């Protein structure tokens, strides 16, 4: 009885560890993607000035502003993509349920 409980606790601990690893991998991936997007956003004023498309004053404030805007747009994209996937899944479940009833 006590051995079974210990085995169950070890199994749950292993499962919790695996969930932690998956979530940590996702979080690190999100962090590095956001960092890359921020660096690309920070280079935007330099590229626009170099190409002569628009004259943006090259100050630290503007560079940080474009980096933050890029990260916020990236996070909004991730949020909307997740929302779309969840709504698509829910609607497919509801359609299947409705088809079974008829």
Image (cartoon, helix red, strand yellow):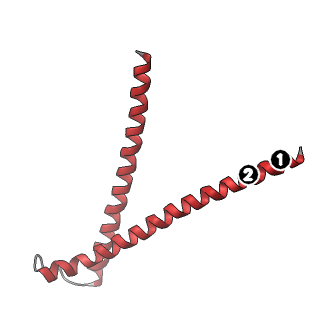
Q: Is residue 65 visible?
A: no
The N terminus: image quadrant? top right
Q: Which mark is residue 11?
A: 2
31 or 71, nearer to the observer: 31
* Left or right, residue 92 beside residue 41: right
Residue 85 image point, x, y percent: 39, 45
Q: Element under label 1?
A: helix
Is residue 38 left or right of 5 when viewed as pictured? left
Which residue corresponds to the image point at 49% horizontal and 61% vertical from the top-left? 26
- The percent coordinates of residue 55 (x first, y second) are 13, 80
Quadrant containing the C terminus is: top left
- Label 2 vs 1, first from the N-terminus: 1
For image coordinates 55% across by 59% down, the residue present is: 23
Q: Residue placed at 35% from the left, 67% from the top?
A: 71
Could you tell me if residue 63 is visible in this image? yes
Residue at image x 44%, y 19%?
100
96 above or below 63? above
Res. 33 image quadrant: bottom left
In terms of depth relative to the viewer, which is nearer, 11 or 98? 11
Displayed quadrant of residue 44? bottom left
Question: Does the CB distance between marks 2 and 1 fall below 8 Å?
Answer: no
Q: x and y percent of residue 88 in the render?
A: 37, 39
Cα separation between marks 2 and 1: 10 Å
Give neighbour class at mark 2: few <14, some 14-19, many 20+ (Cα, 10 Å).
Answer: few
Give the tally of numbered discs. Answer: 2
In which quarter of the view is residue 58 placed?
Answer: bottom left
Q: Residues within 10 Å of mark 1 (few under 14, many from 20)?
A: few
Q: Which residue is mark 1?
A: 5
Q: Secondary structure at mark 2?
A: helix
Foreground residue, 1 or 57?
Answer: 1
């Amino acid at each position: 009885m006590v051995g079974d409980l210990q085995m169950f606790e070890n199994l749950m601990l292993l499962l919790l560890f695996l969930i932690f690893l998956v979530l940590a991998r996702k979080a690190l991936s999100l962090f590095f993607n956001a960092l890359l997007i921020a660096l690309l956003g920070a280079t935007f004023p330099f590229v626009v000035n170099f190409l002569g498309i628009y004259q943006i004053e090259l100050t630290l404030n503007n560079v940080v502003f474009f980096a933050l805007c890029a990260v916020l747009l990236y996070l909004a994209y991730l949020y909307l993509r997740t929302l779309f996937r969840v709504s698509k899944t829910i609607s497919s479940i509801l359609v299947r349920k409705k088809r079974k009833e008829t």
